[in-house]
Image (cartoon, helix red, strand yellow):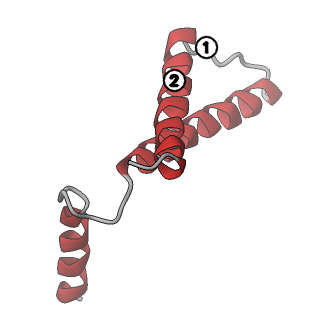
Amino acid sequence: MFNNIKKQIMAFKDIFKDDNTINEKNVIGFLSFAIMVIFATADIVTGFLGKDLVVQEFIYNSFVIITLGSLGIAGLEKFAKK
């Protein structure tokens, strides 16, 4: 069990190397999108309960910009040759 945990920690450290296979822009874009989905779900649930979920508009817009920016850049990198 200790070896399995050690392998997972080593795999997490591999994310921060310069020669890894993980596209960090995709990870950030997905996490930002996931936060937006969680917000939308919480808004729907609180709407059914009769409460109003108040989130500042600039916070939500920040997540939209991060999502579009990171996934857009990752998409352009895929199709544009270096």
Front residue of 14/6: it is 14
Type of residue at label 2? Ile
Specify few, some or many for label 2: CA neighbours under 10 Å numbering under 14, 14-19, or 20 or more: few
Q: In this rendering, would 26 be left or right of 38?
A: left
Q: In this rendering, would 39 be left or right of 20?
A: right
Specify few, some or many for label 1: CA neighbours under 10 Å numbering under 14, 14-19, or 20 or more: few
Q: Which residue is mark 2?
A: 65
Q: Earlier in the sequence, mark 1 or mark 2?
A: 1
Please tell me which residue is depicted at 26% across the width and 74% down the height of the picture.
Answer: 8
In the depicted structure, whether residue 8 falls above or below residue 80: below
- Counting from the top left corner in percent of width and height, residue 46 is at 72, 28
In the depicted structure, whether residue 70 falls above or below residue 10: above
Corner quadrant of residue 16: bottom left
Assign the N terminus to one quadrant of the image.
bottom left
Corner quadrant of residue 75: top right
Front residue of 21/60: it is 21
Front of the two marks 1 and 2: 2
Could you tell me which secondary element the residue under label 2 belongs to?
Answer: helix
Q: Are marks 1 and 2 in contact (CB under 8 Å)?
A: no
Please tell me which residue is depicted at 74% across the width and 34% down the height of the picture.
Answer: 45
Please tell me which residue is depicted at 20% across the width and 70% down the height of the picture.
Answer: 9
Q: In this rendering, would 31 be left or right of 64?
A: left
Type of residue at label 1? Val
- Counting from the top left corner in percent of width and height, residue 7 is at 22, 80
Q: Which mark is residue 32?
A: none
Q: Which mark is residue 54?
A: 1
Could you tell me which secondary element the residue under label 1 belongs to?
Answer: loop
Please tell me which residue is depicted at 38% across the width and 54% down the height of the picture.
Answer: 23
